[in-house]
């Protein structure tokens, strides 16, 4: 096979012997792939930066049998502000773990990659609360994966007004009457409801372009956490990273 040109970001880097690395990379067209970076640990290696966790760049790969190898890389963004801040690195690592779980090889991952990059940018370059960024990421990710919640009407009676509850059982909004009869429901303010609508409907590039109050933020964080855990059937916790 000839060379393959692709953009990609390093999700995982593992040492392989004294000088090499085995990497997990997310690409828009190839999906999540494993690739070897020969000599990447050498001080003068041209792959020294391009083989590091969170490096996003233009890569030239080649494939032998079932293994990809990195021929060269031109870094585009290394998210330096994340690397130098332990708390930001903790959140970026947690998000990366989720990305690893929901991506596969040989699938179009463009929208997931776009969301991932924009989430990392928000962590790196803005002063938005990290939990707020994480909540938006979670809700948008499950929507991209095909679990977008019903945001147009009550999932039980189809009423379009007084949508005051989010139902984990019925995947979306419920009115103030039906929601009280569903034990999986979480009460939400109008601001939270509007925020969820915006997250689900907006493109990944604009998904972070809003702010809400402290109480609504806490509601959004709880709903996003429980909804993602329910749909991915896994109890994600920050303390599992470091």
Image (cartoon, rainbow, N blue to C red):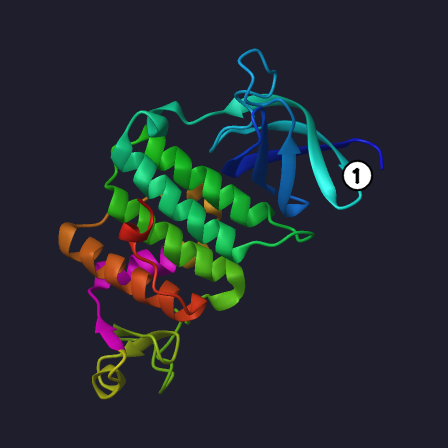
The image position of residue 236, as x and y in percent, is 34, 59
User: Which one is nearer the viewer's eye here, 196 or 41?
Assistant: 41
Residue 123 drawn above or below residue 151: above
Q: Quadrant of residue 61?
A: top right
| Residue at the limit of the structure toward the right, as seen here | 1
Q: Which residues are magenta?
A: 185-198
Is residue 149 at least partly visible in the picture?
Answer: no
Residue neighbourhood size for the residue with mark 1, other residues' Cα within 10 Å, grouped as few (<14), some (14–19), many (≥20)? few
Give the residue at x 56% y 22%: 75
- The residue at which mark 1 appears reads as 64
Q: Which residue appears farthest toward the front when viewing the image?
A: 18
162 lies left or right of 50: left
Residue 187 in percent (x, y) is at: 20, 72
Q: Quadrant of the C terminus?
A: top left
Question: For this view, does 38 lie left or right of residue 234?
Answer: right
Q: Is residue 17 above or below residue 174?
A: above
Name the quadrant containing residue 142: bottom left
Q: Secondary structure at mark 1?
A: strand
Q: Quadrant of the N terminus?
A: top right
Residue 87: image location, x then y, percent: 26, 36
Main secondary-structure element of the magenta-colored stretch: helix
Question: Going by the picture, which residue comes out furthest to the left?
Answer: 215
Picture quarter containing residue 224? bottom left
């Amino acid at each position: 096979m000839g060379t393959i040109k692709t953009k990609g970001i390093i999700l995982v880097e593992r040492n392989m012997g004294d000088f090499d690395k085995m990497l997990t990379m997310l690409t828009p067209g190839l999906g999540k792939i494993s690739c070897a970076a020969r000599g990447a640990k050498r001080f003068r290696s041209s792959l020294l930066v391009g083989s590091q966790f969170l490096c996003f760049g233009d890569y030239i790969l080649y494939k032998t049998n079932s293994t990809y190898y990195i021929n060269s890389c031109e870094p585009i963004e290394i998210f330096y502000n994340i690397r130098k801040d332990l708390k930001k690195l903790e959140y970026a690592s947690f998000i990366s773990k989720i990305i690893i779980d929901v991506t596969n090889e040989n699938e179009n991952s463009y929208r997931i990659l776009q969301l991932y990059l924009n989430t990392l940018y928000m962590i790196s370059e803005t002063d938005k609360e990290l939990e707020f960024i994480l909540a938006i990421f979670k809700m948008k990710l499950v929507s991209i994966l095909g679990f977008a919640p019903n945001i147009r009407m009550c999932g039980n009676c189809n009423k379009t007004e007084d949508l005051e509850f989010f139902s984990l059982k019925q995947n979306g909004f419920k009115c103030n009457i039906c929601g009280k009869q569903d034990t999986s429901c979480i009460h939400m303010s109008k601001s939270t409801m509007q925020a969820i609508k915006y997250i689900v409907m907006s493109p990944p590039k604009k998904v972070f372009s809003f702010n809400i109050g402290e109480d609504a933020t806490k509601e959004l964080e709880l709903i996003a956490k429980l909804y993602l855990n329910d749909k991915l059937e896994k109890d994600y916790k920050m303390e599992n990273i470091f």
